[in-house]
Structures are given as structure tokens and as C-alpha cells.
Image (spheres, rainbow, N blue to C red):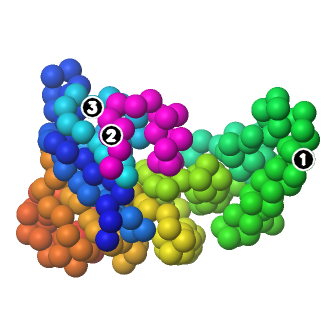
Amino acid sequence: MKEILKTKNLSKFFYGLKALDRVNINVEKDKLTLIIGPNGSGKTTLINVISGFYKADEGQILFNGMDITNKPPHEINWHGIVRTFQVPQPLKKLTVLENLLIAEQNPGERILNSLLKKWVKKEEEIVEKAYNYLEFLGLDHLWDSEAYKLSGGQLKLLEIGRALMANAKLIVMDEPIAGVNPVLANNILDRITELKKQGITFLIVEHRLDIILKYVDHVYVMANGKVIAEGGAEEILNNKEVIEVYLGATDEAVKCGV
């Protein structure tokens, strides 16, 4: 399988302390790659550097073979890496549909296209695209509800929809099922599984291992800013270093996602 994202010896310092220490990961196209580790291990710092919210102090980030190291977030987004956050950040007074519509790059807003009236057809296509995504995510019945009325899990689905409208090739997610009930958490992950089949790649940070591990293709484990292990879910569950360093002592802790 072809890799879509690669980091080479990526390092990040905060006040002289290494939050990332020569981190190397490879994210395969059309796969779900999971990053786990204890609090303070560098997981969120890593995805913040990849998505341009923090600048790397050392190392390199390659996306589809192109060097995107330290490019600003809007450029990285334009290239197809879209970030979602642990706390969803929609425009809460806009409707669900409107939140998707504003995520689309709309050429109808350009002066020439407006004069030629091409924007009318384009607007119709964008609305249809957005509604199709809402149907796929199970949010179509809420299309005219203001975003602030949605539950936490529904907001996570809305974030995915916004990423899809932005034509994401790689969606980077920070704890997409945190605080979500197990039924809806599995629904979110089922949607992600379907999107992989459609050519979308996922890089996810998540603590709820009891739910997410059965969905992942590859796992990286971080501690103290370093990658200490990688492999399939079963391999990680049976890795003694992971149990000792990340989870703290017992196999039961692994199963519970502590």
C-alpha cells in the first residue's frame, strides 16, 4: 500500500523540553492509523505539528511525497489534510446544512463566475453534495437545526461532514469518540470505515481502546515524546513495553482502555 503521510525525525521543543523526540510515522493510504499513549506523551503535539498549528523544530513532514513541513494550516488544508478537534468547533448559530456549505471552496463567489452566472449551477451542486453527506452521516433529519442543538456525538459527525466538504484526503482527528455513548461511538467508527473504502485516510488520536481497536489498521504508541511501539491491534495489546510504559501494569488495563 502507498503511504500518504510520512514524518522523518520530527521534533518539537517547548521551553527547552522535547515534546516530540525524532518521531517517525508512516500513514498508509485508505487506512485508519491510530496514535495512543498516556497524557503528555506527545500525541496531540504530533497532530498539531502535522496540521500546521505548531511549527516543527527539527525533521520533516511529507504528504503525498511533497514537503509540507511548517506550512501554515490553511495551506495544509488546501492540500487535503483536514483536522478535527476533541471539542468540535462548528459555527453553532448556523444550521447543520449551512455548516457544511461554508466548508466548501466555492468558485461561484469569484467575480467572473458570478458575471457568467455559473454560480447558480455550482451552488445547487454544493447543496446536493452537502445533503448527500448528511444522509451518509445520519444527520439529514437535522439539516435545518442550529448546530448548538446537536449532541456531542452528532457534532463529531458534523465535523466529519465539514472535512468531507473540504475535499479531505487525510482526516486527522483528536479523540473523535471522547464523551460519546458506545452506540454512537461505533456508528461514528462505522462511517469512518465506509469512508476508507471511498479513498479517505484517517490519522486518529483516541483513548477509548475498548471501542476503537477493532477498527484500526495500524497503531503507534507514544511515551515521553517518542514512538515506543507500532503494529497491529493484537500485537500492541500483547506488547509488554506498551503495558508497562503506557498502560501501567496489567492486560486488564489494556482491555479497559485506561
User: Rounded to the nearest whole Å, what is the CA distance between mark 2 and mark 3?
Assistant: 13 Å
Q: Which residue is mark 1?
A: 120
- Kind of residue at disc 1: Val
- The residue positioned 28% from the left and 51% from the top of the image is 6
Rendered view: 142 above or below 252: above
- Kind of residue at disc 3: Ala
Q: Which residue is mark 3?
A: 56
Q: Is residue 208 found left or right of 125 in the rendered image?
A: left
- The residue positioned 82% from the left and 50% from the top of the image is 122
- The residue positioned 60% from the left and 42% from the top of the image is 89
Q: Does 106 appear in magenta? A: no
Along the polypeptide, which appears first: circle 1 or circle 2?
2
Along the polypeptide, which appears first: circle 2 or circle 3?
3
Q: Which residue is mark 2?
A: 67
Q: Which residues are magenta?
A: 65-84
- The residue positioned 50% from the left and 48% from the top of the image is 80
